[in-house]
């Protein structure tokens, strides 16, 4: 999928309103006000969504789902609140941090099974990855590979690690999927 098609998934107004929903959900979870779950008409079907919270550019929480219900806006609200309060890597966001946080939303397109040995199957910066084997599954968003300057092989290996699998599971029969994502936020 080329960048022009990916950017057409959502309008600027939809992106702005979805970030506002995510921020409102974080504020409500931290106790500052009631959540505003605004209806955002015309949203496309999505295979998943992730909400990332950063403080001064540093990761502060990130949670999402690969099982979006019919209302994408509700999933964004839920994931934002959970990223602020239950990401096991971080303590809950506090009231004192609210003015310093930024919100990033990643709306995932459909999962496409790939042959991970095909060098053309994964384009860094365009595709995110899911690796599955048995009951284990790991997902990394497209922007993660760019942030860490990973090669295609490193990205595949790190997705295996995220799934709790051996680093080379992608070479040994684990199912590998790619997806495109529209990533936007208030930074």
Image (cartoon, helix red, strand yellow):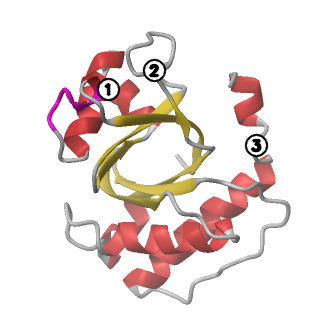
Judge left or right: residue 62 versus residue 111.
left
Q: Residue at x 66, y 69 (%)?
A: 73
Q: What span is colored magenta in the figure?
A: 166-170
Q: Quadrant of residue 155?
A: top left
Do callouts 2 and 3 mark residues in contact (Cβ within 8 Å)? no
Mark-to-mark CA distance, 2 and 3: 20 Å
Residue 174 place in picture, x, y as percent: 31, 36
- Residue tagged 1: 155
Q: Nearer the viewer, mark 1 or mark 3?
A: 1
Q: Quadrant of residue 29?
A: bottom left
**Local secondary structure at mark 1:** helix
Label 2 Cα crowd, 10 Å radius (few <14 / some 14-19 / many 20+) = some
CB contact under 8 Å: marks 2 and 1: yes
Residue at disc 3, secondary structure: loop
Q: Which mark is residue 124?
A: 2
Q: Up-down: is 149 above or below 161?
A: above
How far, Cα to Cα, is label 1 from label 3?
A: 25 Å
Q: Is residue 119 magenta?
A: no
Along the viewing direction, whichever of 180 and 29 lies nearer the viewer: 180
């Amino acid at each position: 999928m080329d960048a022009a098609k990916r950017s057409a998934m959502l309008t600027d107004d939809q992106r702005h309103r979805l970030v506002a929903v995510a921020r409102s959900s974080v504020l409500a979870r931290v106790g500052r006000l009631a959540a505003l779950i605004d209806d955002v008409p015309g949203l496309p079907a999505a295979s998943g969504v992730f909400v990332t919270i950063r403080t001064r550019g540093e990761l502060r929480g990130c949670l999402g789902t690969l099982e979006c219900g019919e209302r994408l806006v509700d999933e964004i609200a839920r994931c934002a609140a959970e990223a602020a309060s239950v990401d096991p890597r971080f303590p809950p966001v506090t009231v004192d941090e609210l003015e310093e946080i930024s919100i990033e939303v990643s709306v995932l397109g459909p999962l496409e099974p790939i042959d991970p040995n095909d060098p053309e199957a994964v384009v860094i910066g365009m595709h995110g990855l899911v690796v599955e084997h048995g009951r284990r599954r790991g997902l990394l968003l497209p922007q993660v590979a760019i942030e860490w300057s990973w090669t295609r092989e490193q990205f595949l290996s790190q997705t295996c690690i995220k799934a709790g699998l051996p680093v080379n599971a992608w070479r040994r029969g684990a199912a590998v999927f790619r997806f495109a994502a529209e990533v936007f936020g208030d930074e």
